[in-house]
Amino acid sequence: DVNELRDYRGGDPAKWKKYMEQRYKDPSIVDKALEHDVAWRELRAKIDELRKDVNKLQKEVIAPKKKAKEPCDEEVAQMKAMQKEIKDREEELPVMAEKRDTFLNQIGNMVDPEVPISKDEDADNLVVGVYPEPEELKANPNLLPCPLGKLTYTLPETQPLTHDDLLWRIGGYEPVRGQNVGGHRAYFLTNAGVMLNQAIINYGIAFLSARGYNVLQPPFMMNKDVMAGIAQLEDFDEQLYKVSGKTDDPEGSSEKYLIATSEQPICAYHKGDWIDPKELPLRYAGISTCFRKEAGSSGRDIRGIFRVHQFEKIEQFCLTGDDFELSQAEQKRMLDSAKDFYESLGLGYRVVCIVSGELNDAAVKKYDLEGWFPGQQTYRELVSCSNCTDFQARGVGVRCGHADSKKSDLTARASYVHMLNSTLCATGRGICCILETYQTPDGVVVPEVLRPFMGGKDFLPFVRGPPEITKGEKGGKGKGGKNKGGGKKNNKQ
């Protein structure tokens, strides 16, 4: 909202420059947005002044002369010249507004006070929870929250095999056949892999439904103009697949984008709506296939299904009233739902508050729930839980109620809903963590809560030996498989 920068409207540009600095972005963007806004407002004021002059000329000079049947050709010509100038200047207004908005759209959201101001995730991500609780934290409950680089505790148990090996041995996927059909990172899920995938989806639906969520399966493609109101510019290059070509669309629309998460279409579910505050909060469970280019992940996690171009995901998406305390509380509630979900599956995890330099423009705060992968002997991201306040709602025009102020109050603001999103489970990553956690010498035990969704099956036996290592993988199995945090006991986490 440009009014957040206009001091005469109660805005505070210095505050937004500070937020930009905390995000490690150029604070001068705020100044540039203001410069273009001043130019836009000056042009609009000039147009208003010209209109007044035209009205005055018409009312006080031309009309009386015409009534008196006196010649007024010169004044009429002057009025037409002024009207042409108004028209020409009005055509400049949207051009100047677009220049202003180019900079305005580069300004990120505010930054929550809890967020660590840093761009070093390995050192400064703030650990706020660990499950199961290690002995060090039991002995010293005040140890958390603590920066990742300063926290030392005993890591959970490790296991010998990684998920790609296990998924192959239980006959759960065919990576080579998938790559022959779909190229890099493509795969076929088969038998046990399909059953696990569907079981997680159905359990996730049941889990969120029991917590009062409305279940949505959204379109997997979005119109370009709708996606542009939600996704960041870099997402179009690094994440989003473009779909184009002639269709039977009566509006002739032929340019669409595949969704990278159901957050995107659900964000636009109430596009243009004015929601009664009494109806809030609204809570949705999004079930969808997701498509990501992973353009910035070359060479990482090339084995298995942890990082792929196509996967299923269960997403939490919630709307609250225009109140920061409300959305802060909702974010904690959504995070608690994710924690309960993984605890019910018997999976270990830690929760970190992400550093300011790694937040996307929309999020004021983001928690990551990182599952413990015993085979890789490290933590990997399973959940991302973000509070975006009214940032996304403004892009799709979702309002709630009315601002309580008089028309003469220049500091009045339109009231928009706050939007929050959180992964419940990306099924591929969930499968990976389950396999590594529940492996035995003969197969994989099925978590108890998933058994009703797998026809009562409680064990997935190995049906073949280990997969062959390709020439490109020799000497570096699972390249990119380990991330921050190391994998040894008593190592800094």
Image: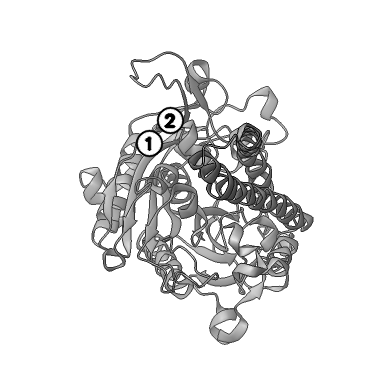
Work out how far the residue at label 1 is from the one at label 2, CA to CA, in angstroms. 6 Å
Callout 1 secondary element: helix
At label 2, which amino acid type do we have?
A: Tyr
Residue occupying image coordinates x 64% and y 51%: 49
Q: Quadrant of residue 148?
A: bottom right
Question: On the image, numbered disc 2 is attached to which residue?
Answer: 173
Picture coordinates of residue 369, whole percent (x, y): 51, 60
Callout 2 secondary element: strand
Colour mapping: one colour
Counting residues from the N terminus, which is met first, the one under dot 1 or under dot 2? 2
Disc 2 residue crowd, few under 14, some 14–19, many 20+, Cα 10 Å: many
Picture coordinates of residue 278, whole percent (x, y): 27, 68
Asked if labels 2 and 1 touch by Cβ distance under 8 angstroms, the answer is yes
Depth check, front residue: 287 or 328: 328
Asked whether the viewer can see residue 491, the reply is: no
Question: On the image, numbered disc 1 is attached to which residue?
Answer: 193
Depth check, front residue: 199 or 39: 39
At label 1, which amino acid type do we have?
A: Gly
